[in-house]
Amino acid sequence: MGVSNQTVKTAYDSAMENFNLAADALQLDENIRNMIRSPERILEVSLPVRMDNGHIQSFAGYRVQHSTARGPAKGGIRYHPGVTLDEVKALATWMTWKCAVVNIPFGGGKGGVTCNPKAMSQVELERLTRRYASAILPLIGPEKDIPAPDVYTNSQIMAWIMDTYSMTKGYPVSGVVTGKPIALGGSLGRNEATGRGVYYTVCSAAEHLHIPIAGARVVVQGFGNAGSIAAHLMHDNKARVIAANDSRGCVHNSKGLDVTKLIAHKEKTGGVVGFPDSEPISPAELFALECDILIPAALENAIDGSNAGKVKAKIVGEAANGPVTPEGDAILEKNGIFLIPDILCNAGGVTVSYFEWVQDEQHLFWEAQDVYNRLERVMKTSFAEVLKIRLDHKVSMRTAANMLGISRVAEATTLRGLYP
Ligand code: NAD
């Protein structure tokens, strides 16, 4: 996170500020704003879990449904020590606009548990997950709210949620979560979908700006699922990934890192640090590197008013949710840096989650190439729609994406009317 003396703005503050900017640009009616702005439902739970040492520890958990105007709520579950209700509300809000930007029939939701999964055994994680799944059970279901993986959750955790839900129903319900293992009704291509979607939107932006991907210098902050897969696709297409980091440290090589080997190194050692043929740099240096494409792929508020001025990239592709604050946005825009906002850039994950849900509902599964082709079409169409709004209305890419998402949610809300 950039260090700044200004009052710290929360992720939900940023989400609301961006909502207001887009709603103003749309000249959205005040009544509609009041209907779509705030989360529809918030559940806060306390999760007692027996730890391996015999002690019982209670964890705070949340599930927020921001909107079901266009379909069931959809959004991941985050396990992280920094999870707060404010963060989950922001993430749920962004999911609503994101699903609408890529025009899939879902609303927005998000869940989280405040915990440190890195310090827990697999058995403790399973107990926590099953307790959390049973606590949020009244809210979730294939027609109501469909969780998926997010930071520090994965396909195994989705499998435990699917099993817990199915055991209480008395029959298998694969469509209750997405991002499942293939053996349980997961979709081919889901694991790499977010990174692949980032790659497609970065290619669209590069084409718009006449920057060839071959030879482009790429920097990735957060070498996890989204970041490493986007980096791998860039590398495969002859871009030069010159720096990457994770929570433990950063590695840099101006000639380019071998991304396949870096992924293997991270799998083996748990982090990117110590990768041969690289030198360590600080996170501040990583953001300030001379490069063409910067991909923040870790957590919120990484680029703010204090460090946005140092960014030298031509394109910033937000693989993470909310990595640039509104102050950071204004500086990047002023400096002519092309931003691909999160609700567009990382929407590949939820798009293939939608494909997974469709396959589960139909009990009919697609080949990987079908998934990639459909995903590419969705991402490139959505990019073109957002870019058109930016050019027509002379607004930032973030405001343009929010205008597209919010206008679709507003239309659905108007058509449905106000109950009762
Ligand atoms: P992940 O757990 O696979 O990876 C997160 C990575 O970020 C890890 O390598 C971690 O070490 C690193 N990290 C954590 N704190 C960091 C810091 N301060 N500096 C640098 N690196 C740090 O998670 P993910 O699924 O790749 O999610 C990353 C981001 O992408 C999140 O914002 C998430 O909401 C967003 N996202 C993920 C998906 C998805 O399908 N996985 C979809 C849409 C958006």
Image: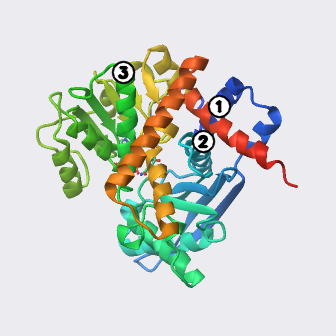
What whole-number distance in Å separates the C-alpha atoms at marks 1 and 3?
Answer: 25 Å
Would residue 275 be found to the left or right of residue 418 on screen?
left
**Which residue bears the numbered disc 1?**
17
Viewer-nearest residue: 158 or 113:
158
Labelled pair 3, 2 in contact (Cβ < 8 Å): no
* Marks 2 & 1, CB-CB < 8 Å contact: no
- Point out the frontmost of discs 2 and 1: 2
The image position of residue 94, as x and y in percent, is 58, 43
Q: Nearer the viewer, mark 3 or mark 2?
A: 2
* In front of the other: 215 or 57: 215
Give the residue type at disc 3: Lys
Q: Amino acid at mark 2?
A: Trp
**Residue beneath label 3, please?**
314
Which badge, 3 or 2, comes first in the chain's sequence? 2
Image side of residue 119 versus residue 290, left or right: right
- Count residues near mark 3 (Cα–Cα under 10 Å), then give few for <14, some for 14-19, many for 20+: many
Residue 249 picture location, percent across and down: 28, 42
Percent across and percent down for residue 349 are 44, 50
* Residue under the point 61% across and 34% down: 404
Occupied quadrant, residue 319: top left
Mark 2 to mark 1: distance in Å?
14 Å
The amino acid on which the numbered mark 1 sits, given as a three-letter code, is: Glu
Residue 102 image point, x, y percent: 53, 42
Q: Which label was assigned to residue 97? A: 2
Tell me what residue is drawn at x 76 percent, y 37 percent. 33
Front position among marks 1 and 3: 3
